[in-house]
Image (cartoon, grey):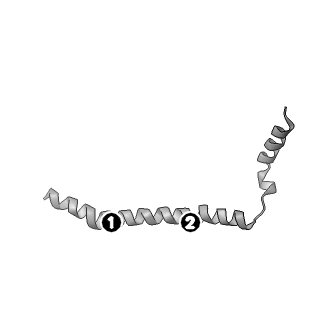
Amino acid sequence: MDPAIVKYNNMSANRWRYFRWTPRTAWITFVYVVAVPSVVGYVGFVTEVSCLFALCDMARLGDG
């Protein structure tokens, strides 16, 4: 087997041993743990609130 593939497999299996906190890994962690869920939650909240107070009320007026 190719030694490069063996080295890659060993590195992949032991990735947690080689992890170090750097500014780059801290930024990536922040983006995926805080920023992305916040943006998704905000968009969902704004969409739900606008539906509850504007679009859904107009839809109910037509049901009368």
- Image location (x, y in percent) of residue 53: 28, 68
Q: Which residue is mark 2?
A: 35
Residue located at (51% from left, 66% from top): 38
Residue 52, image quadrant: bottom left
Vertical relation: 39 (above or below) 18: below
Secondary structure, mark 1, is helix
Q: Amino acid at mark 2?
A: Ala
Q: Which residue is mark 1?
A: 50
**Which corner quadrant holds the N terminus?**
top right
Q: Amino acid at mark 1?
A: Ser
Q: Residue furthest right?
A: 3
Crowd around label 1: few <14 · some 14–19 · many ≥20 (10 Å): few
12 left or right, relative to 57: right
Residue located at (33% from left, 66% from top): 50
- Image location (x, y in percent) of residue 58: 21, 62
Q: CA distance from mark 1 to mark 2?
A: 22 Å
Q: Are marks 1 and 2 in contact (CB under 8 Å)?
A: no
